[in-house]
Image (spheres, grey):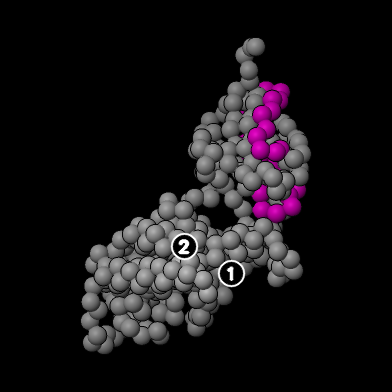
């Protein structure tokens, strides 16, 4: 092993040690005395398949009151990759990273902790400082344990009473982690333990995964209309069709649109249409193929309030930096 490699490894180990010390220094000293699990009445999550083929996950309180309904598409079955995809190559490029096991267990010292949310007792929680240490250690990625065998959730979930929202430190750690890592140039990842002994385990797991997927607004639909090309709307891997809908708030006359596609070199979007809602149906005011990095198009004036970019055919999950709408040109 050469001197440079040895120095890099030693430096990485020192950085990891400092990071661990800093994270633990932010926590209150946990009371080691046993604490009984308080009686909780968690919401109940059930699933059903609707007429359009989507799976509805209905969340109701223990006394039967509606809380929320999530819709997920389980019609596509993904298989393990047989070749190095773009995502696999990106993962390989990260090389060195962190795994942050921060949960209810942190304050008890038992991997299989079963206890009330009150056991979660951070006194000086500072998630951005974690991300700074990841960067200083030259890490390419970091993974956070969002849920472990204690079933405690690091985000304010509608599916459970055992979350950060029920504690004296209600910070949405998942959101803060993702935002802080991206700010420091570190790719964020999440770990979710699927161990669940509940009567509605499958539905509960899917609902919680749905919340995690929508927890981070960085790749949400709003990022495609925020006039910032550095952000982007992204869809799941393997998605071959999708649409991005914009509600203008009131009817407006439109005649021009600009589409900026993230990672245009991948040539994902094959066919698309710009559509407006007329009564109860969507009508196309422009159709095209392969939009490239930036496409500026004009079309016959239309009056509309809901407008959408409909990706009809894509080789993989489409991702859009900007979708801008303008009134017709008044002259040259």
Residue at image position (52%, 44%) is: 231
The C terminus appears in which quarter of the rendering?
top right
User: Looking at the image, which is closer to me, 268 or 324?
Assistant: 268
Residue at image position (23%, 77%) is: 29
Neighbour tally class for label 1: few under 14, some 14-19, many 20 plus, Cα within 10 Å: some
Q: Main secondary structure of the magenta part?
A: strand
Residue 261 part of the magenta segment: no
Residue 139 marker: 2
Single out the mark in the foreground, 1 or 2.
2
Q: Position of residue 304 (x, y in %)?
A: 62, 30
Extreme residue toward the bottom, this view: 34
- Element at badge 2? loop
Magenta residues? 291-318
Residue 47 marker: 1
Q: For the residues labelled 1 and 2, say whether their Cβ atoms are less than 8 Å apart.
A: no
Q: Position of residue 296 (x, y in %)?
A: 66, 29
Residue at image position (62%, 14%) is: 330
Residue 298 part of the magenta segment: yes
- Element at badge 1? strand
User: Looking at the image, which is closer to me, 43 or 212?
Assistant: 212
N-terminal label among 1 and 2: 1
Q: Position of residue 70 (x, y in %)?
A: 55, 60
Q: Picture quarter containing residue 113?
A: bottom left
**Is 20 displayed left or right of 48 in the figure?**
left
**Is 185 displayed left or right of 256 in the figure?**
left
């Amino acid at each position: 092993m050469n001197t440079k490699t040895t120095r890099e490894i030693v430096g990485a180990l020192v950085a990891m040690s400092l990071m661990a010390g800093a994270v633990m220094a932010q926590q209150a000293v946990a009371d080691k005395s046993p604490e009984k699990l308080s009686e909780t009445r968690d919401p109940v999550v059930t699933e059903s398949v609707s007429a359009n083929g989507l799976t509805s996950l209905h969340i109701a309180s223990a006394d039967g009151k509606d809380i929320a309904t999530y819709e997920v598409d389980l019609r596509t079955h993904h298989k393990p990759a047989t070749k190095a995809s773009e995502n696999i190559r990106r993962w390989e490029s990260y090389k060195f990273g962190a795994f942050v096991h921060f949960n209810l267990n942190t304050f008890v010292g038992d991997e299989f902790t079963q206890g009330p949310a009150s056991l979660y007792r951070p006194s000086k929680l500072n998630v951005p400082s974690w991300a700074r240490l990841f960067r200083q250690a030259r890490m390419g990625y970091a993974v956070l344990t969002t849920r472990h065998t204690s079933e405690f959730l690091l985000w304010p979930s509608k599916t459970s009473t055992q979350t950060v929202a029920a504690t004296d430190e209600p910070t949405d750690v998942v959101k803060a982690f993702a935002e802080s890592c991206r700010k420091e140039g570190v790719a964020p990842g999440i770990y979710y333990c699927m161990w669940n002994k509940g009567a509605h385990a499958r539905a509960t797991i899917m609902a919680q995964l749905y919340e995690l997927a929508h927890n981070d607004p960085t790749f949400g639909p709003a990022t495609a209309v925020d006039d910032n090309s550095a952000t982007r709307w992204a869809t799941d891997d393997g998605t071959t069709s999708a649409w991005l809908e914009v509600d203008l708030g009131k009817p407006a006359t439109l005649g021009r649109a600009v589409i900026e596609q993230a990672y245009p070199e991948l040539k994902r979007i094959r066919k698309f249409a710009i559509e407006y809602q007329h009564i109860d149906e969507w009508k196309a005011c422009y159709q095209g193929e392969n939009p490239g990095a930036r496409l500026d198009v004009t079309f016959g004036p239309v009056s509309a309030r809901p407008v959408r970019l409909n990706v009809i055919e894509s080789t993989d999950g489409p991702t859009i930096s900007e979708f801008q709408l303008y009134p017709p040109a008044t002259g040259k």
